[in-house]
Image (cartoon, grey):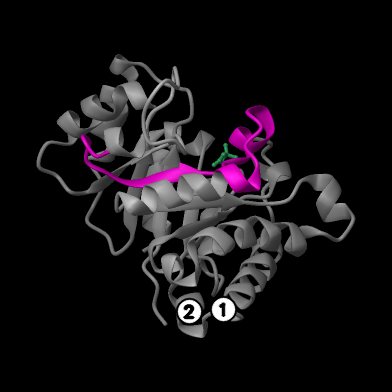
Amino acid sequence: MIRQKIVAGNWKMNGSAESIKNLVDGLLKADQSNSEMVVFPSFPYLHLFSTLCGNSDLIKLAAQNVSEKESGAFTGEVSAAMLQDFDVKYVLVGHSERRSIYGETDSIVALKVQSLLKKNFTPMLCIGETLEERESGQTLSICEKQIQAVLDLVGIEAFNNIVIAYEPVWAIGTGLSATPEQAQEVHCGIRSFIAKSSESIAQRVQILYGGSVKASTSHALFAMPDIDGALVGGASLDAEEFLEIVKAAG
Ligand code: PGA
């Protein structure tokens, strides 16, 4: 099964109108490729980003978060319906920073996935273990538990429209990437777990790796059979470096 690779840049809470203009200018110099380039700017810059991209479909626009609520008195939140006013394709859910800093539980993450699917977005579901969990041999069981909460709410068919990002918490922003072999082992485990519900969906679902991905480490990661791209934080803030990663994805 050939799965299209995705290289996604999570800009987190970085950038200004000025710096984003420069970054998008740089990214629009990319050559056409077989992989999909995705960027997650923060909410205030979604419109600017679309405007800067004009008619180009080189970069897919994405959002970093969504509320699990539909509308109403939820100050500071952004609903899935609001995101429909932008040209957004993917939305991150369950990023470890949301889970650990903002207390998002597996059940909130599942509700967010559900609200996105209702509005035809593709949730990019982030999962991954902490260092302590890895060291106590719980890596796969943690990933499975995080996926199971979503499966229980939306069912296996929904995974036709969900992308998974495996991001070991200890590798995010630390410069300590998982080795290609370590990542492959977990990706293969995640795919086998999904295969228990549907073999065909398991073969189709794209599983990205995230955690300190750089141009220099991306080739070896992408050579692994179950790694279908990358979710990139720090290195996505440098257009040249990010485009090198997109190139490595082929
Ligand atoms: P990093 O971030 O590449 O800076 O480790 C990855 C992420 O948080 O998605």
Q: Amino acid at mark 1?
A: Ser
> Which quadrant is home to the C terminus?
bottom left
User: For this view, does 130 lie left or right of residue 235?
Assistant: right
Q: Amino acid at mark 2?
A: Gln
Of residues 41 and 110, the one drawn nearer to the viewer in this rendering: 110
Q: Residue at x 67, y 39 (%)?
A: 175
Of residues 58 and 82, the one drawn nearer to the viewer in this rendering: 82
Q: Residue furthest front?
A: 72
Q: Residue at x 16, y 29 (%)?
A: 51
Which secondary structure, mark 2?
helix
Q: Is residue 62 above or below residue 216?
A: above
Q: Quick one: label 2, few (<14), some, or many (20+) residues within 10 Å?
A: some
Point out the tag, 1 or 2, that comes first from the N-terminus: 1
Give residue 152's position: percent from left, percent from top.
Answer: 58, 63
Q: Residue furthest right?
A: 136
Q: Residue at x 43, y 75 (%)?
A: 204
Residues shaded magenta: 84-108
- The answer to which quarter of the image holds residue 73 is top left
Give residue 136's position: percent from left, percent from top.
Answer: 90, 56
Of residues 241 and 23, the one drawn nearer to the viewer in this rendering: 23
Give residue 1's position: percent from left, percent from top.
Answer: 42, 82
The picture quadrant for ligand 1 comes to top right
Label count reads: 2
The residue carrying mark 2 is: 203
Give residue 83's position: percent from left, percent from top.
Answer: 29, 36
Q: Which mark is in front, 1 or 2?
A: 1
- The answer to which quarter of the image holds residue 182 is bottom right
Of residues 93 and 57, the one drawn nearer to the viewer in this rendering: 93
The residue carrying mark 1 is: 197
